């Protein structure tokens, strides 16, 4: 806002930290990594507080023409702000999660994570199409190394699969981007978001972007890399993968596919909705029969991401807001669930559900946290999961009752597999003596899980904090999509006088929150 | 134009040839004792030639003022761009050679002289404006190269490489010559200008056959599929510094020559050769990638990698636009850096006895025994695969951008999808170095010259390279404009 390049600084801090970690010994590298991520978290807080809700659509803009063919252009709107906040929030927790569990090649490990952080922030902050692509693709390299070097037994297969799968998805997007640049004559994303591509081309472009984002998301049937990558990655790698990397797919839809190709999005919405329906039911059933905790949570991620995609392709404000909330919530909750798995994995070195049991007896605090996140994953009111899923499904109901019906069963199945997991791990009798002897959470683990728990509750009780910065952007996107909006099959009854009044009151309230807040304060000041 | 003006235009070639002859005399008189001094002198001579070439490029020389000897040589910015890449490759190949040959006591004074003559020949190739100049340059380079391939006389593999290179190279020259004679027969001239004009309109079958044969001969020289079979064997058998030379300088020269012939001499028959180039390009990408998967020798792997990269460069040629030509030059510059880096890294892989390690499986766990080499090699491999943020991605990007802007979206899409196959084997090298348990095979030390070359080339292909994109594109655009202006 005031010309201070805070986004560049947020990219630079972890990058410098990565270089430093690369050359440092294990102990120093850990501290440097934690420091760098905490500095970035502080900068993230500054960013959020400095973000003017209801102000200009793009804020904190920077642009330098240092490259040929594309420019170093950064800038964020409310959507990007939320995802950057999620990233910088999770990163220190990831470093803490790896504090003791990673003992070999610590410097390189921390460097890979910090480099990853730079790239993730870059993806959300980039305002140039090619810059976005570079950040988007570059993330493969550190993640490949994280899975391959510090992963589990079958890490090599998983790292290859992750890399090649996502690469194949993305390369076609590059060709589509080049065509767009050729046609529109610019690489600047805000301009492209307003540009009307020819309808015939839109379909092809949409499909090319879809190939990339569907793999990244991941959507059924191209989700198979995810369970492998999750299971083999170290705990912190899983957290980042589930917490932020998957969000890049959703961010891609909301930033590129929908605003740039609205007609094609409407035309092909059936594809997305169809795949999402299958994903919700199928992957939930698959999750139900898993014996590996990480795999179970990985499959639940696929199901949750399907709730995101149906909301995105509902073409209305509720759906879009719901999708964003599911993404944020899932970033926190699934990240926390992987941390919960990591906590007991560090003690017993197995992810087999059967090896545990009755942890509520010897690890009551752990059991409490685990329960909160389980509830968050199920979408219990009061936790973050509820807000997003409800909005998303309510939005979808307006365009397709069938899709909503099928996807709502996913919530029930979600409750089934999560509660079943929780029962087997935490309740029941202590059948293994080694599991029964595990100590409860230590201070470091408190520091990891505590903040996430607070954020989950905050988002569940007062989602307005998270919705407010995005409201104007979502409304703009909704307006952009208005002309292409498909006709829904739900038939709401004509409102009676009473309901209309309530609706109007609600609308007023929203309106007041979003835009007239300062006026109210001014009035109060006047008194 | 008078004779003295022509002579001043070809000053770099004069410096190279006189310097080469002088050093040949020195070599004859002083013998192998002086080989190191002659190497240094050769690098200086190449540097002098480069110094004479830089103003031509930066000034963006083009048009009638660049034609020497009645248009037989074209000393324009395009030639200068290619020449500078050739000079850089030649100089690096001289810098890493002495230590390699000393291992066998085979460092001979003729080596730098041969490199010098090869470089001279390539300089003539890229500035050729006439089929005869083209052929003289090509043969001058090739004859030196055949000897270089077989330079380790006591090593069977080296001798085999030299023989294979000679036989197949001679065959390629024959094909090329046949095509040239047909072209001459149907157009009545060997000058590119006259050929261009004579081929305007409908092309006769004879001239078409000539065109196909010329392109086939050139495809041999750039080792594009289906004329690539010699590459893995020659790359594997030749002494590593020579392999590095083959992977860089002759590739640049032959590619630039192909561009000049296709876009200038055959520039009005783009539709006649475009399908050939498209086929050769896609076939090179796919075969180069598939062939590399099974390789365990790193030099063979790099040979297939070079075939693969040639395929990508040719995508820019298929576009047949100034933008495509500029993109090819940018790609070539990045490709030279990546090849130099990868071969220097290979030269740094030595076991405790000082023998060179070439087997990929012996690199297991290199990231723990020699972390810096391993990281540099990993970055170079990912750059070759074209993964952002490494600079190799930029080369692919500009080439594809040119193709898309020329309306060749389907070809660009197929080529980029095939690049994922290539990513597999590059990742394999990374996997062996980083994920596997160390075998402690690579333990030898290295001198500062190798480190410096490795660090510089890695820095160039690292994301820092993007800071050079403005400058690189500007030079490449000048060169491409010069190429198309004559055309």
Image (cartoon, rainbow, N blue to C red):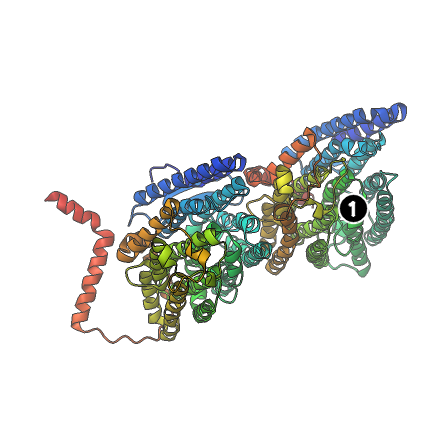
User: Would you identify the image quadrant in which residue A382 lies?
Assistant: bottom left
For the point 42% across and 46% down, which residue is it? A91
Q: A369 left or right of A353?
A: left
Residue B257 as seen in the image, left or right of residue A95: right
Q: Is residue A455 above or below residue A403?
A: above
Relative to B347, residue B199 above or below? below
Q: Quadrant of residue B34?
A: top right
Q: Is A126 in front, or is B157? A: B157
To which residue does mark 1 refer? Answer: B236
Tell me residue A454's x, y (percent). Answer: 31, 51
Does residue A379 lie above or below B288 as drawn? below
Q: Residue furthest right?
A: B29
Q: Nearer the viewer, residue B110 or B50?
A: B110
The residue sitting at 51% across, 53% down in the picture is A233
Q: For the image shown, how many numbered marks are present on the structure?
A: 1
Q: Residue at x 70, y 48 (%)?
A: B361
Measured as percent of width and height from the top left, residue A309 is found at 42, 64
Of residues A239 and B121, the one drawn nearer to the viewer in this rendering: A239
Query: Split into 4 quadrants, where in the image is the N terminus of chain B?
Result: top right
Quadrant of res A386: bottom left
Along the horizontal axis of the image, is B359 left or right of B30? Answer: left
Q: Chain of mark 1?
A: B
Provide the secondary structure element on which disc 1 rests: helix
**Relative to B181, B279 lies left or right:** left
Q: Is residue B204 visible?
A: yes
């Amino acid at each position: 806002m005031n010309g201070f390049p805070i986004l560049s600084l947020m990219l630079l801090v972890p990058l410098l930290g990565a270089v430093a970690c690369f050359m440092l010994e294990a102990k120093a590298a850990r501290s440097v990594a934690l420091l760098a991520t905490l500095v970035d978290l502080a900068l993230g807080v500054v960013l959020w507080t400095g973000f003017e809700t209801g102000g200009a659509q793009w804020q904190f803009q920077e642009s330098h023409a240092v490259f040929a063919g594309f420019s170093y252009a950064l800038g964020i709107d409310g959507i990007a702000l939320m995802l950057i906040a999620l990233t910088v929030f999770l990163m220190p927790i990831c470093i803490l999660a790896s504090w003791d569990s990673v003992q070999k090649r610590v410097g390189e490990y921390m460097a890979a994570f910090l480099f990853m952080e730079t790239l993730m922030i870059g993806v959300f902050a980039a305002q140039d199409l090619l810059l976005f692509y570079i950040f988007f693709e570059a993330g493969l390299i550190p993640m490949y190394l994280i899975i391959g070097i510090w992963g589990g037994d079958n890490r090599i297969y998983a790292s290859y699969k992750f890399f090649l799968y996502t690469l194949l998805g993305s390369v076609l997007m590059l060709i589509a981007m080049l065509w767009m640049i050729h046609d529109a004559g610019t690489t600047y994303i805000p301009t492209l978001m307003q540009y009307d591509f020819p309808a015939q081309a839109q379909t092809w472009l949409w499909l090319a972007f879809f190939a990339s984002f569907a793999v990244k998301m991941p959507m059924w049937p191209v989700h198979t890399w995810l369970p492998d990558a999750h299971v083999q990655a170290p705990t912190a790698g899983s957290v980042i993968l589930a917490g932020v990397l998957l969000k890049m797919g959703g961010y891609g839809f909301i930033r590129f596919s929908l605003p740039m190709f609205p007609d094609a999005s409407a035309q092909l919405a059936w594809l997305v909705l169809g795949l999402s329906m299958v994903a919700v039911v199928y992957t939930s059933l698959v999750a139900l029969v898993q014996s590996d905790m990480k795999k179970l949570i990985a499959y639940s991620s696929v199901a949750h991401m399907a709730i995101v995609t149906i909301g995105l392709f509902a073409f209305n404000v509720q759906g879009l807001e719901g999708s964003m909330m599911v993404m944020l919530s899932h970033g926190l909750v699934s990240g926390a669930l992987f941390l919960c798995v990591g906590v007991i994995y560090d003690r017993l070195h197995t992810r087999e559900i059967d090896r545990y049991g009755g942890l509520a007896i010897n690890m009551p605090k752990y059991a409490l946290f685990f329960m909160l996140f389980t509830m968050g994953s199920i979408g219990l009111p009061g936790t973050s999961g509820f807000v997003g899923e409800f909005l998303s499904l309510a939005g979808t109901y307006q365009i397709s009752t069938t899709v909503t019906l099928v996807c709502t069963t996913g919530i029930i199945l979600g409750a089934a597999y999560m509660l079943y997991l929780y029962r087997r791990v935490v309740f029941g009798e202590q059948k293994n003596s080694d599991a029964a002897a595990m100590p409860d959470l230590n201070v470091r683990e408190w520091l990891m899980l505590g903040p996430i728990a607070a954020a989950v509750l905050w988002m569940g009780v007062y989602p307005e904090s998270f919705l407010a910065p995005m409201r104007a952007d979502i409304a703009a996107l909704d307006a952009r999509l208005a002309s292409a909006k498909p006709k829904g099959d739900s038939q709401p009854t004509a409102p009676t006088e009473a309901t209309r009044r309530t609706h109007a009151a609600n609308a007023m309230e929203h309106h007041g929150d979003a835009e007239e807040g300062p006026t109210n304060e001014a009035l109060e000041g006047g008194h | 134009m008078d004779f003295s003006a022509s002579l001043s235009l070809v000053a770099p070639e004069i410096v190279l040839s006189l310097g080469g002859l002088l050093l040949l005399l020195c070599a004859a008189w002083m013998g192998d004792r002086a080989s190191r001094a002659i190497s240094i002198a050769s690098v200086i001579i190449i540097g002098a030639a480069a110094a004479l070439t830089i103003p031509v490029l930066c000034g963006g020389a083009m048009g009638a003022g660049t034609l020497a000897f009645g248009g037989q040589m074209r000393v324009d910015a395009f030639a200068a761009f290619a020449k500078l890449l050739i000079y850089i490759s030649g100089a690096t190949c001289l810098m890493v050679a002495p230590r390699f040959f000393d291992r066998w006591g085979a460092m001979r004074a003729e080596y730098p002289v041969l490199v010098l003559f090869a470089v001279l020949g390539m300089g003539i190739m890229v500035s050729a404006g006439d089929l005869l100049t083209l052929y003289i340059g090509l043969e001058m380079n090739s004859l030196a190269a055949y000897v270089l391939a077989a330079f380790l006389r006591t090593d069977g593999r080296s001798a085999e490489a030299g023989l294979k290179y000679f036989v197949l190279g001679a065959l390629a020259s024959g094909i090329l010559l046949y095509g040239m004679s047909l072209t001459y027969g149907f157009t009545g001239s060997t000058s590119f200008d006259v050929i261009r004009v004579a081929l305007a309109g409908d092309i006769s079958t004879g001239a078409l056959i000539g065109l196909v044969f010329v392109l086939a001969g050139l495809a041999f020289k750039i080792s594009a599929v289906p004329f690539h079979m010699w590459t893995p064997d020659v790359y594997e058998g030749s002494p590593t510094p020579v392999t590095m030379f083959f992977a860089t300088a002759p590739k640049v020269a032959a590619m630039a020559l192909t561009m000049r012939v296709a876009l200038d001499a055959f520039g009005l028959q783009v539709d006649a050769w475009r399908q050939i180039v498209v086929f050769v390009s896609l076939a090179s990408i796919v075969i180069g990638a598939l062939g590399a998967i099974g390789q365990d020798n790193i030099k063979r792997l790099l040979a297939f990698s070079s075939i693969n990269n040639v395929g990508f460069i040719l995508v820019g040629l298929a576009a047949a636009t100034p933008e495509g030509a500029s993109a090819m030059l940018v790609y070539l510059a990045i490709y030279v850096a990546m090849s130099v880096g990868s071969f220097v890294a290979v030269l740094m892989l030595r076991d405790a006895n000082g023998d060179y390690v070439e087997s990929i499986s012996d690199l297991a766990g290199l990231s723990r025994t020699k972390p810096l080499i391993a990281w540099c090699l990993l970055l170079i491999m990912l750059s070759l695969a074209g993964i952002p943020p490494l600079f190799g991605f930029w080369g692919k990007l500009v080439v594809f951008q040119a193709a898309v802007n020329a309306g060749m979206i389907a070809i660009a899409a197929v080529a980029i999808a095939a690049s994922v196959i290539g990513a597999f084997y590059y990742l394999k090298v990374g996997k062996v170095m980083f994920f596997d348990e160390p075998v402690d095979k690579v333990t030898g030390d290295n001198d500062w010259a190798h480190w410096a070359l490795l660090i510089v080339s890695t820095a160039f292909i690292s994301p820092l390279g993007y800071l050079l994109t403005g400058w690189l594109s500007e030079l490449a655009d000048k060169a491409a404009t010069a190429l198309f202006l004559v055309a």
